[in-house]
Amino acid sequence: MSEIVLSNITKSYGSHLAIPGLDLDIPKGSFVTLLGPSGCGKTTTLRVIAGLEQATTGEVVLGGRTVYSSRTGVFVPPERRGLGFIFQSYALWPNMKVDRNITLALSEAKQPAHVIKERLSVALAKVQLTGLEDRYPSELSGGQQQRVAVARLIAARNAILLMDEPLSNLDAKLRTEMRTELKRLHRELQATTVYVTHDQVEALTMSDIIVVMKDGVIQQQGTPYEIYHDPANLFVAEFIGDPRINLLDGTLSTAGGERFVRFEETDTPVPAGLQSTDGPVTFAIRPENIAIVERPGPASLAAEVDIVQPTGSQTIISLSVKGHRITALIPRFETTLAKKNVWIDFPADRLTFFDKRSGTRIP
Ligand code: ATP
């Protein structure tokens, strides 16, 4: 069942069309991430759901209730949409202590005192801030302030949570911890969550569904697995994955009933059933799928190792094949390969193909 339905949303700022027509269905209880580069319209979409921004045209339905329709003129203001928010700046009230920050919405909604007390203590315990309820936000670290914002969401028990880059002000270590916390929060509250980020790791680690956007247009919507392994086009392929996917230009050909992609005089077999005629093509292979081999096989390419960068459990290896830069990633700590000559293979079942002109994935 859909909890959030956006139909044909457009949003203009003056003459600038930020969202040219967006349809999105978000299932109840899911964690959906809007992902894309700066300016792609993620925040605008979230603000349209929240009612902080009014779409130019279209319809927004939350939990079966129409909260915006350009056709009928309905516009329900944010505070009456039953949403919880958490934004980049946590928007804590500086002049209120932690407990008031967490319970303000509950007291404004005239919840009985014992309910407020109970929810406060549960929320504080969940984010491990018990004992700090008498502090002001300025007396807390950035991470603790973040957790107050999370506690406020826990206490409010909204069916829908909207989060806009909530972790971007945190240092790397805390960000990783908070990712786990937010995921746990989602599992416990089972609230439909829409999360905005430009950080692909956040998207991949936390989401049930990722919606990749560019220029206000959805490029692909799918599970993290689908987005990573079956990118719909070159934009998604390049945007997801660190180190970046390798994109190479080759030529598809058929010989002796078999199909190959020719790259620098070497023919690599391609997956059976690839739906493309022979000719120029862009193909892609993720760094972790490049095989560095000791003895060359029939489709091996000679490569020179340029830079070797161990990251701990993995090593990023920059290679050069006849002037083409190729990145490989191996699952171990490696330092001995620098400046060596090696052979690499592209395993056929790890290649994905894209139309050179449109950038669309060839199935
Ligand atoms: P970021 O990650 O940088 O926040 P975003 O993907 O969230 O980017 P939006 O903030 O939704 O992008 O902006 C989408 C487009 O709309 C951008 O081109 C932006 O410049 C424009 N835009 C957003 N808000 C306004 C505004 N108040 N007035 C004019 N243009 C705006």
Image: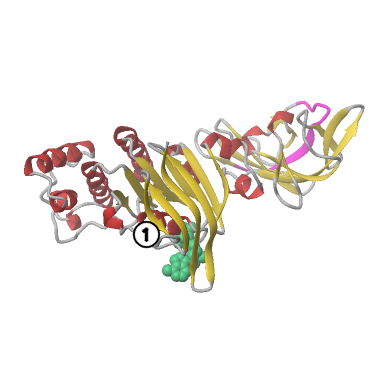
Specify whether 199 is left or right of 280: left
Q: Which residues are magenta?
A: 295-308
Residue for point 49% across, 52% down: 7
Residue for point 45% across, 55% down: 59
Q: Position of residue 348 (x, y in %)?
A: 74, 30
232, 52: nearer the viewer: 52
Residue where numbered disc 1 is placed: 74
Residue 98 visible in the snapshot: no
Q: Is residue 194 above or below residue 340?
A: below
Q: Report helix, strand or loop for mark 1.
A: loop
Q: Residue furthest bottom?
A: 14
Which amino acid is tagged 1?
A: Val
**Residue 305 on the magenta span:** yes
Q: Residue furthest left?
A: 113
14, 339: nearer the viewer: 14
Q: Position of residue 249 (x, y in %)?
A: 78, 47
Specify whether 105 is left or right of 2: left
**Residue 278 on the magenta span:** no
Residue 146 visible in the snapshot: yes
Q: Position of residue 321 (x, y in %)?
A: 76, 43
Residue for point 13% across, 54% down: 97
Specify whether 56 is left or right of 78: right
355, 300: nearer the viewer: 355
Residue for point 62% across, 34% down: 288
Quarter of the image containing the C terminus? top right
